Amino acid sequence: MITKSTLRSVATGLLLLLAALIAANLPAHGASGPWQRTDIVEARLVAAVDGAGSLDRVPLGLHLKMKPGWKTYWRSPGDAGLPPQLVWDGSRNLAGTEMRWPAPHRFTLFGIETFGYDGEVVLPITARPVTPGQALDLKASADLLVCSDICVPQRLELTLALPEGPATSSGADANLLARFTSQVPGDGTASGLSIESARAVDGALRVTASAREPFVDPDLFVEAGDGAAFGAPKIEFDAGDRHITVTLPVTGEPVALEGSPVTLTLVDGLRSMERPVTVAGAATGPGSGFITDGAGLAAMLGFALIGGLLLNLMPCVLPVLSLKLLSVVGHGGGAPREIRAGFLMSAAGILSSFLVLAAAAVALKLTGSAVGWGIQFQQPLFLIFMVVLVTVFAANLWGLFEIPLPRAIADVAVGGALSGHHPSLGGHFATGALATLLATPCSAPFLGTAVGFALARGPLEIVAVFGTLGLGLALPYLAVAAFPSLAARLPRPGRWMVVLRRILGVALALTGVWLLSVLAIQLSPAAALVIGALMAAVVATLAVRRRLPGRARLAGGAVAALLAVASFALPLVPDRTVSGAAAATDAKWMPFDKAAIAGQVAAGRTVFVDVTASWCITCQANKRLVLSRDPVAGRLFNGGASGGVVPMQADWTRPDDTIAAFLAEHGRYGIPFNIVYGPKAPQGIPLPELLTESAVLEALDKAGG
């Protein structure tokens, strides 16, 4: 018999089951904010995770749904329109954001070309918390221009609360965000697309491109400065629809395209790619342009050769110059045959090292990892290794220890000449390899252009450019090998070399101090002081060891070795509470925020962006010789934002994906990199690696109009 009590129990159980099912299907707390709606658009903030976790980069998105027949705009809207803008005032624990843009669609009306999105779109956003691990309380004012037959500005107040807790996937919201993130154009590697050439021809821009799979419905979007506008593209197919030629007529006022920087976004259905290029002039033969023609590649190889040669003169190569000098002095009065062989082996060490760097760059690029010139100096372990290395070299030059046995180890470890031995071929090779290692934190003129070209292309270009860079750095060695009498005429080694060795040991010690200053940023000042103290203890132990007898001397050497090894045992996980993009090293500079640049330019201001790092000697030279001196400093700092110039600094001392992506967008994979944005140059005016007063002032004047 079914009693009332039984019925109540069954009913209660069914209600609990229903409540559990409903709760299981509700979105997780913090994964999305509430919808804000108007008559024509609705918007919300979404997150790919349910909690802040310990992430220093939180994946978010601006989710928009437009009514049928309405659209909003891409970052470059075309002939008319405005892109969405977000202001994060009132947010808590937010250091900054970066918005990315899925590939747009083209809308043509009465000959007016605009680019944007209709229906539904999610604009991916990367949020940087001030304190990773704490909750994010986000508030954003979204300003949209939504158009159909008429255009209606919209402002929506959006919120999203992301609590503390594990950063687990939030299901549907994570999938939605991943779907639109996959539509953000990359470099073409994953999509199988390639832009081969771009040139100005008869008042139009002509671009050639190819695809791994046949094109179906391609389109090309061009972002150019100085008010340039382009009409609808005319597309010609060939090679089984795997190759296209796109011609876009210049509309409005005529502009000089040749030599101007543009950003090309190639779209074919769900496939897309993006790359910044410099437009070449008209050519008579097929295949001419900025990328694939032989002349263009030959020009980049010429840049690489000159850049590698100039590396010999850069201040960060002072330790290398000391090694070269000792190597030359060690040849004083030697036989020409031995001199030639030694310098050829040093050149071989340089070339081999550059080819190893090329292979590493190819491998990193194929795996989708960040790749750039000198980025190994962002790694604390590498810096500690370099500190130990230059300390050992300096101690050897000061005569605190010799390595008579085994001979091969002495030659390979310190290049033979440094240990007091006549160097073997292996020692010469090691000297060349070390020259390459210590040269990488510098960016000489022409080098950045060549490296950027190579890293934006394929394996063959990377190997060719890096090999030519090595040839340029090795040219002084090859010159002595060709004319060995230059070294043979030097005086024979004598007592004067003791003084020279001590001076060069001081130069290497100063290099170690500089490396410790970089470590102070990577780890902490306390950690850098501890490592510095350990290195001082190594030198002191080696000095005392010389006076010890027999086995005690061996024990002293073991103690010095243990002290050196102990430096690697320090905590190597740096405190990254503040990201590299936000860690401006000077209070006069604003932290880098790419998303804020467009707003500053729209307000009529000029933005000067300085991508720098404490390990980049060329960056420090630019700062001291140009940026911190009048009249440039007066233009950048004295007026502040109200004076029309906003100085913005991106510190790449630590790895930072935002900065790496910003460099890649401009075809740069090394620093220094400086670019000026303004009302007359919204796409930016890149500056040379070595800054001059006239170059900076001219760019500021041109960008600000």
Image: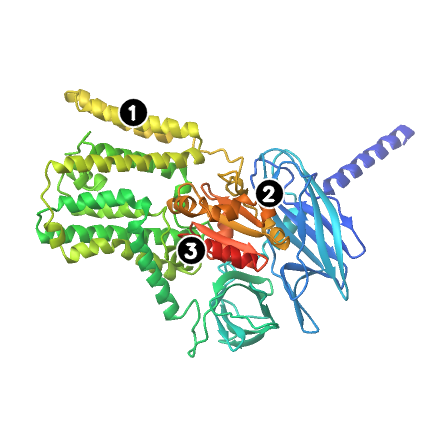
SS class of the residue under badge 2? strand
Q: Nearer the viewer, residue 459 or 306?
A: 306
SS class of the residue under badge 3? loop
Q: 637 above or below 574?
A: below
Q: Amino acid at mark 3?
A: Pro
Residue 96 is labelled as 2
Q: Quadrant of residue 133?
A: top right
| Residue 632 visible in image | yes
Of pointers 1 and 3, the one earlier in the residue sequence: 1
Q: Amino acid at mark 2?
A: Gly
Q: Nearer the viewer, residue 59 or 98?
A: 98
Disc 1 packing (10 Å; few <14; some 14–19; many ≥20): some
List the residue tagged with mark 1.
Answer: 537
Q: Residue at x 9, y 43 (%)?
A: 492
Residue 395 in percent (x, y) is at: 23, 32
Q: Residue at x 29, y 34 (%)?
A: 509
Q: 132 above or below 228?
A: above
List the residue tagged with mark 3.
Answer: 688
Residue 292 in percent (x, y) is at: 41, 68
Locate residue 297 relative to residue 537 in the image: left or right.
right
Q: 322 above or below 667?
A: above
Disc 2 packing (10 Å; few <14; some 14–19; many ≥20): many
Of pointers 2 and 3, the one earlier in the residue sequence: 2
Disc 3 packing (10 Å; few <14; some 14–19; many ≥20): some
Residue 86 is labelled as none
Q: Quadrant of residue 469?
A: bottom left
Q: Nearer the viewer, residue 155 or 24?
A: 155
